[in-house]
Image (spheres, rainbow, N blue to C red):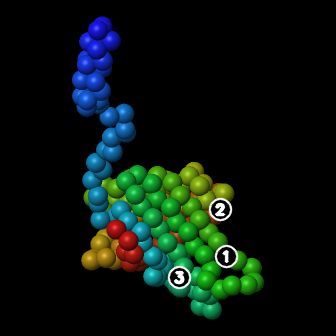
Amino acid sequence: MKIKFLFIPLVALAACKQPSAEKTIVDVPITPLQGTWKLISAVKIIKADTAITYPEKGQEDEMIKVINGDHFAFFKHDLKKGGKPIFDSGAGTYSLTGDNYTENLQYCNYREWEGHSFNFKVSFKGDTLQQKGIEKIDSLKIDQEIVETYIRIKK
């Protein structure tokens, strides 16, 4: 008889909904910057000299930039099969305040670029992102303005 009385409360407890142990996903505001972007053009300006750096003449490659709530990553890969492969990559954290965008490069296949921050102005027109700013690394004697234009390929 005592077993029946113990069984009923156990069934009642099991039927009650227990709090979920699952992680809660924090809502992060989506900005126009977040998404997956494909580079369509890039220009490098050093003093009075301007050079188109993407697309490079005679080279078939593709560059993708992925930006989420607090990190960015970029990957550039040649599309030709055979020969010596081309692969560039980098990633890190970023901040965005208004149109001021700062990339903090933490990882890069060009190790001497790691640990540097680069400030840009960003603008949007539909699914097009333009990023314009200065890349300056004194130890490498790099002091150049870049203008990169991307199109959104995935939201």
Give left or right: position of 85 versus 24.
right
Residue 17 visible: yes
Q: Quadrant of the N terminus?
A: top left
Real-space Cα separation, disc 3 to disc 1, in angstroms: 14 Å
Q: How far apart are the alpha carbons under marks 3 and 2? A: 19 Å
The answer to whether residue 63 is above or below residue 79 is: above
Q: Position of residue 9 (x, y in %)?
A: 26, 17
Residue furthest to the top: 2
**Relative to residue 89, is residue 58 depicted above or below?**
below
Q: 22 or 94: which is nearer to us?
A: 22
- Comparing 152 with 25, the one in front is 25
- Figure check: 129 above or below 52: above
Looking at the rendered structure, the kind of residue marked 1 is Ile
Which quadrant, please, contains the C terminus?
Answer: bottom left
Amino acid type at mark 2: Asn
* Residues packed near mark 1 inside 10 Å, few (<14), some (14 to 19) or many (20 plus): few
Question: Which residue lies under the disc numbered 3?
Answer: 54
Asked which quadrant contains residue 132, the reply is bottom left
Residue at left offset 53%, top offset 58%: 91
Mark 3 closeness class: few <14, some 14–19, many ≥20 residues within 10 Å: some
Q: Residues within 10 Å of mark 2 (few under 14, many from 20)?
A: few
Dot 1: what SS?
loop
In percent of width and height, residue 90 lies at 57, 61
Q: Where is residue 147 in the image (x, y as percent from the top left)?
A: 44, 75
Q: Mark 2 points at which residue?
A: 109
